[in-house]
Image: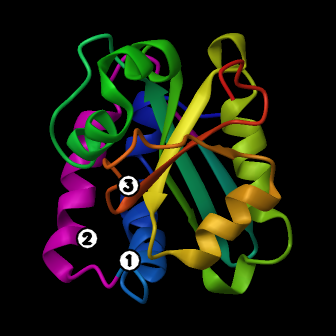
Amino acid sequence: MSYGQAVLDLADELVDVYADVFSGPPWNEDAETIRQFSVRLQADARRRGFRAAFAQSAAGIDGFATGWITPAAFPKDRGYAQVAAQLGPARVRELLTGALEIDELAVRPYARGHGTGRNLLTEITADAPDGRAWLLTSRLATDTVATYRRLGWHEVTPRPGTQTGVIVFLAPDHPGR
């Protein structure tokens, strides 16, 4: 596990992995979005409870995961508004705030199918408060959704009529699953 400055020392390599993973389908992120990941990483590394896990081989960094403790004042930017709409304030407080939020999980295509993603998730969630960890992903990322389900992550059912383009998953050991 790495924290803060140790992660920032690898920022260029992490951006390269991010670009390799998220520039293709179903994400199709453009150069500006990839650049914004680099900027976000600088700020994220200073968040309360920030940590990162890496998978490395002779080829370099094969994958990484980043996360932090979700603050009590649930954010409203990025995908958070969709999460809040689906779950409502009470379930956000109960299931997500104070839990370890997995922000990014990126595994290069050549490193998939060998347990790399599973190992990264296991490492980054090992010290999640009371086993409480969560993540969100796009409903369009069907392979990713299937992988989380296969690894024992549990989808949080949206409130009726609130389903958005994201799925919230709770870790296998999350008490709210």
Name the amino acid, label 1.
Ala
Residue in view at x 46 percent, y 49 percent: 136
Name the amino acid, label 3.
Ala
Residue 135 at what x, y percent from top left? 51, 43
* Image: magenta residue range: 28-52
- SS for tag 3? helix
Q: Which residue is mark 2?
A: 34
Residue in view at x 32 percent, y 49 percent: 161
Of labels 3 and 2, the one closer to you: 2
Task: Evaluate whether residue 62 shows in this view.
Answer: no
Mark-to-mark CA distance, 3 and 1? 12 Å
- 123 left or right of 45? right
Q: Quadrant of residue 87?
A: top left
The reply to whether the magenta stretch includes residue 31 is: yes
Residue 131 at what x, y percent from top left? 72, 19
Q: Which residue is mark 3?
A: 11
Figure check: 19 above or below 177:
below
Extreme residue toward the front, this view: 160
Residue in view at x 69 percent, y 32 percent: 125
Q: How many labels sit on residues?
A: 3
**Residue 39 numbered mark, or none:** none
Instruction: State the residue in front, 11 or 41.
Output: 41
Mark-to-mark CA distance, 3 and 2? 12 Å
Residue 79 at what x, y percent from top left? 27, 48
- 152 left or right of 76? right
Mark-to-mark CA distance, 1 and 2? 6 Å
- 22 left or right of 141? left
* Quadrant of the image containing the C terminus: top right
Mark with earlier residue (1, 2): 1
Q: Which residue is mark 1?
A: 19
Name the amino acid, label 2.
Ile
